[in-house]
Amino acid sequence: MKHSAKDPLLRSHVVFSGSGTRPMIFAHGFGCDQSMWRYVAPAFESTHRVVRFDHIGCGNSDLASFDEHRHASLQGWAQDVADILEAADLRDAVFVGHSVSAMIGLLAAQAAPGRIGALAMLSPSPRYLNDPPDYIGGFERGDIDVLLDMIENNMLGWADFLAPMVVGNGHAPELVDELKASFCAIDPYITRRFAAATFLGDQRADVAAAARAPLPTLVVEMAHDAIAPPTVSRHLKEQWPHARFEMIDGSGHSPHMTHPAETVSFLRAFVGSS
């Protein structure tokens, strides 16, 4: 696939709402789309210019904009965000990223200085693979290889496996069904490559660099997260002493969907102080 020449706002299906002036950008996680923010983003429409978009290959994005070289690493997905910031002339934005989009936001802030003024990260991980003895990301390489193979050859089985992990135990089964449907609706060719960039990437050095030139940063974690386990949290706290960490006593990897009221509360306190 070749990279499209479309306007970045069109290719990523960027949607604006709200009556405020400071931009607040909501970036969905892997396999999802911008609709996953419906429980959280509207709470900020009276105070911010809310911006939502779909990563290439997801939702209503332009599939022809996928580029094998550009999107081989998270830097390419971050450049998509930087393009949106430039095209809409957004400055001092609050970037709210879920899961892999937390690291995409970090990279976009480095790529477009001044465009992002604060980072809010929900269930982030700089490295999903284990790198013993000093770092445990939660997955072995063999686990990821199986996952990547399933995306292109058994999309339904992949969705059945991953969706319950992302939602967590004890939540409405409707959320699991919604996530399965979202996974199965996305382009498998692009998704496999997005998954490789996500699960095989390593943003630990980027986190360390961000700590040396800190933006106001919030990290919201789940107490029981099978995808970003407590070992990841401990690593981030060691590397990022200036960041604010908040914990939700629950399970899963998607606090904005399973615990939206607590997520909104943490975000409000953060944007009020940043």
Image: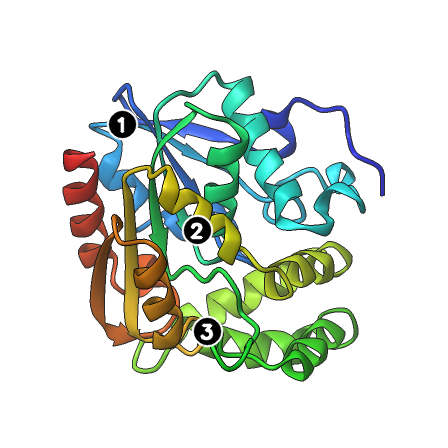
Position of residue 241 measured from the top left corner of the image (x, y, whole percent): 26, 54
Instruction: Kindly report which numbered mark, 3 or 2, lies closer to the viewer in this rendering.
Output: 2
According to the image, what is the colour scheme of the structure?
A: rainbow
Position of residue 263 measured from the top left corner of the image (x, y, whole percent): 23, 54
The residues tagged by marks 3 and 2 sit, at their Cα atoms, a distance apart of: 21 Å
Looking at the image, which residue is at 62% across and 49% down?
A: 74
Looking at the image, which residue is at 46% across and 34% down?
A: 109
The residues tagged by marks 1 and 3 sit, at their Cα atoms, a distance apart of: 31 Å
**N-terminal-most mark, 1 or 3:** 1
Q: Which amino acid does the dot numbered 1 rest on?
A: His
From what the image shows, is residue 14 above or below residue 63? above
User: In front here: 222 or 129?
Assistant: 129
What's the mark number on residue 208? 2
Find numbered disc 1 in the image and state the secondary structure of the residue it sits on: loop
Q: Which residue is mark 1?
A: 48
Find numbered disc 2 in the image and state the secondary structure of the residue it sits on: helix
Does residue 44 appear anywhere in the picture? yes
**Res 143 quadrant in image:** bottom right
Position of residue 35 measured from the top left corner of the image (x, y, whole percent): 45, 48
Position of residue 38 measured from the top left corner of the image (x, y, whole percent): 35, 48
Does the residue at mark 1 contact the one at mark 3 (Cβ under 8 Å)? no
Q: Within 10 angstroms of label 2, few (less than 14), some, or many (20 or more) residues?
A: some
Left or right of 143 in this view: 40? left
Q: Which amino acid does the dot numbered 2 rest on?
A: Ala
Quarter of the image with the N terminus in it: top right
Q: Which residue is mark 3?
A: 227
**N-terminal-most mark, 3 or 2:** 2
